[in-house]
Image: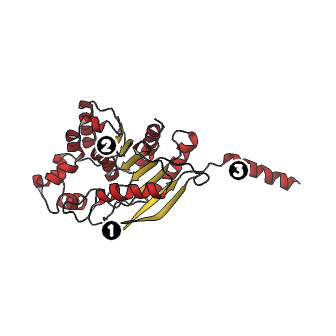
């Protein structure tokens, strides 16, 4: 009898202390006609997913460059735990998060930076807008339309979040960037050759040196130039959140962007915290960035 009572108490305690958990599904694929290959992605489904016919807002969660890949947010950033807590507290509505693979192949000799290649051979940006988002909205119970779409990224993914908000002002309700990879013209000119070629060679031209790198493809994709060319009223169509560490090499570019946005009188959230370009910074920044998008979804 005592043993039975103890068992019931353990069950009762466990039931009250347990937190609802979402589900992370790695190894998902979409067949892309534009890229001529399958595009891998990782999926986060909120607690309670599938129990009813409700539809959800969606966050496109973009990973970083270098050796970054679509599973990183969960393997290194504990994103699912952050999302679970925010949903449980009511700070954000239950949502689906999708992280598409931004590498062109396993070799990853050249980053995509989520852009189209200058020579037209690998059109990642076109794939994302024309195929991937429609695939997500067709395959999963997401709420249709801009007001239920957000995009959040770190480093290269942070660049994409803000760049896409300016290139496609009617696509996302909110865009949040952590340590976004915004380089100034001079930083691009001064990059070592191997670093430049790996990050931007395919997008702007392999082997370019000095100011030859500041060509038409560069200016068509540089956020610090896009902000000057995009009408302020279009930029205002997307709620913007920018967070960059004070020790980050990208801080100069992020600060320059916020100054340009201020000059244009574009409302946005800019935060500079003590920190660098690493997972410690991104893990601590993810809750507030996600909560920002949650508020956008609630509007």
Q: Is residue 75 visible?
A: no
| Residue 121 rendering spot, x and y as whole percentages | 23, 66
Tell which circle, 2 or 3, labels the residue nearer the N-terminal end: 3
The residue indicated by pointer 3 is 14
Between 154 and 121, the one nearer to me in the picture: 121
Q: Provide the secondary structure element on which disc 3 rests.
A: helix
Q: Which residue is at 42% across, 43% downward?
A: 285
Disc 2 vs disc 3: Cβ atoms closer than 8 Å? no
Determine crowd level at label 3: few under 14, some 14-19, many 20+ residues with C-alpha closer than 10 A.
few
**Left/right of residue 105 with respect to residue 57 in the rendered view:** left
Front tag of 2 and 1: 2
| Residue 116 rendering spot, x and y as whole percentages | 25, 58
Tell which circle, 2 or 1, labels the residue nearer the N-terminal end: 1
Compared with 242, 65 (above or below) is below
For marks 2 and 3, give the CA distance: 47 Å
The residue indicated by pointer 1 is 105
- The mark found on residue 169 in the picture is 2
For marks 2 and 1, give the CA distance: 29 Å
Q: Provide the secondary structure element on which disc 1 rests.
A: loop
Determine crowd level at label 2: few under 14, some 14-19, many 20+ residues with C-alpha closer than 10 A.
some
**Left/right of residue 97 with respect to residue 218 in the rendered view:** right
Q: Which residue is at 18% across, 63% downward?
A: 119
Determine crowd level at label 1: few under 14, some 14-19, many 20+ residues with C-alpha closer than 10 A.
few
Q: Which residue is at 56% across, 53% downward?
A: 22
**Left/right of residue 196 with respect to residue 76 in the rendered view:** left
Which quarter shows the N terminus? bottom right
């Amino acid at each position: 009898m005592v043993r039975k009572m103890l068992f019931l108490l353990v069950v009762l305690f466990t039931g009250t202390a347990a937190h609802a958990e979402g589900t992370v599904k790695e190894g998902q694929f979409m067949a892309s006609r534009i890229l001529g290959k399958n595009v891998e992605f990782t999926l986060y489904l909120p607690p309670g997913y599938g129990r009813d016919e409700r539809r959800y807002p969606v966050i496109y969660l973009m990973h970083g460059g270098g050796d970054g890949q679509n599973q990183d947010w969960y393997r290194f950033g504990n994103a699912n735990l952050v999302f679970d807590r925010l949903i449980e507290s009511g700070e954000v509505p239950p949502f689906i998060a999708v992280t598409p693979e931004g590498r062109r192949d396993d070799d990853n000799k050249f980053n995509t930076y989520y852009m189209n290649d200058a020579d037209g051979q690998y059109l990642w940006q076109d794939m994302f807008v024309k195929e991937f988002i429609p695939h997500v909205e067709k395959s999963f119970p997401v709420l249709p339309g801009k007001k239920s779409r957000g995009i959040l990224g770190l480093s290269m993914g942070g660049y994409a979040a803000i760049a896409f908000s300016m290139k496609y002002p009617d696509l996302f309700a909110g865009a949040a960037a952590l340590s976004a990879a915004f380089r100034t013209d001079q930083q691009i000119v001064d990059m070592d050759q191997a670093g430049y070629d790996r990050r931007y060679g395919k997008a702007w031209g392999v082997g370019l040196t000095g100011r030859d790198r500041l060509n038409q493809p560069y200016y068509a994709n540089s956020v610090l130039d896009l902000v000057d060319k995009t009408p302020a009223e279009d930029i205002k169509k997307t709620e913007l959140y920018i967070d960059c560490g004070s020790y980050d090499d990208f801080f100069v570019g992020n600060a320059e962007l916020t100054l340009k946005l201020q000059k244009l009188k574009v409302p946005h959230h800019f935060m500079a915290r003590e920190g660098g370009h690493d997972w410690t910074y991104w893990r601590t920044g993810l809750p507030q960035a996600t909560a920002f998008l949650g508020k956008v979804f609630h509007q």
